Amino acid sequence: MRRTYGVLLAVALVTLGTAAVMAQQNAPAPTGPVPPGLPEWAYTPPVPGAPPPPSALPSDDNAPVSIPGTTKTFTRGQLRAQKETMDWYPEDRRGNIPNIARFGKEGVRQCTLCHLPDGSGRPENAPISSYSPVYFMQQMQDFRNGLRKSADPRKANTNVMIGFAKATTPEEDLAAAEYFAQQPYPRRMKVVESKTAPKVRMQGGMHMAIPANEGGGMEPIKADEIVEVPDDNLRAEARDTRMSWTAYVPPGTLNRGKQVAAKAQCALCHGANLEGIGPVPALAGRSPSYTMRQLFDFKTGARHGPWGELMRPVVANLSVQELTAVSAYAASIQPPVAARPTTTSAAR
């Protein structure tokens, strides 16, 4: 497998070599001001002076936590993943999880802390399940070389990722890439066109619906925004990889997004159902907040690696409103079905 991906990586890098040189020569300046038009709903920056975000997890690190669908229990302390990420469903995994993804190392937190044991991630970070190792390796290289940043300088976890990329070795990157490439992306996203959406707050690093007993409820959704929330706050904080998510969008958004996808010819590279082709990543069924951030980062030049050079002309003439609509449309497409393995060698 490593030899195969090595050949693919070499071919891709030759193909993109000229773009890489251009990207390095034109790399954006370090942290700067927030660009105009930034869709803050997608970047979820911290609110100055806001009270500490609440947690759905117990306050006691020794308190056991259980979730529907499994008899397993973990303590809150274990779920904080100080040493390794707890996996509620190890039977779902394919292949052996490498140490860098399971435990991390000095100066590098384990990949599964943020991206989850199956790589599906959450709205605040990347969904890396089923990514081609070629694409994965290029992104690590871009982070390492200062070619991939966030358009929002307040997006702290992007800066953390840059530090991690500088501290890992190519061998560790490839081990993680090969593992996450084997993990099918789950069918967990539902996109709902609605005039209203849940009231949300920052919780666990993402937007979560405020419970009704804490003043939550539905409110008018703002035009050209997406409200993406987990369907269960506790399960989201507990890193449950089988739970579902809902993205609320204004009426008419999905049809506009479909038109934008046709206008921008997204299917040409990402596939007829946006399922991804070769090293080109899949978009179907993935977090619309994440997709929106990447499109805006491409548009502003914050993502300036080889793939950024290819994407930037595509998004250059698209408005923020159009990018929002196409992000919602991509999320509404179900990713390909992948049967769960009947056996697994994943670490338990």
Image (cartoon, rainbow, N blue to C red):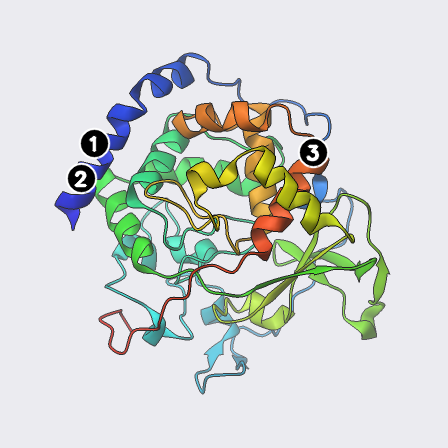
Residue 209: tell me if it is visible.
Answer: yes
Crowding at dot 3, Cα within 10 Å, few <14 / some 14-19 / many 20+, comes out as some
Q: Position of residue 326 (x, y in %)?
A: 62, 43
Q: Compared to 208, does 165 lie above or below?
A: above
Q: Secondary structure at mark 2?
A: helix
Quarter of the picture containing the C terminus is: bottom left
**Contact between labelled residues 1 and 2, with CB atoms less than 8 Å apart:** yes
Crowding at dot 2, Cα within 10 Å, few <14 / some 14-19 / many 20+, comes out as some
> Residue 80: which disc?
none
Distance CA(mark 1)–CA(mark 3):
35 Å
- Callout 2, which amino acid? Gly
**Contact between labelled residues 3 and 1, with CB atoms less than 8 Å apart:** no
- Callout 3, which amino acid? Val
Residue where numbered disc 1 is placed: 10
Q: Position of residue 148 (x, y in %)?
A: 46, 30
Left or right of 45 on screen, residue 82: left
Count of number-bearing discs: 3
Q: Name which residue lies at 32% across and 46% down.
A: 132
Distance CA(mark 3)–CA(mark 2):
37 Å
Residue 161: tell me if it is visible.
Answer: no
N-terminal label among 3 and 2:
2
Left or right of 215 on screen, residue 341: left
Distance CA(mark 2)–CA(mark 1):
6 Å
Q: Secondary structure at mark 3?
A: helix
- Name of the residue lying farthest toward the left: 3
Residue where numbered disc 3 is placed: 320
Residue where numbered disc 2 is placed: 6
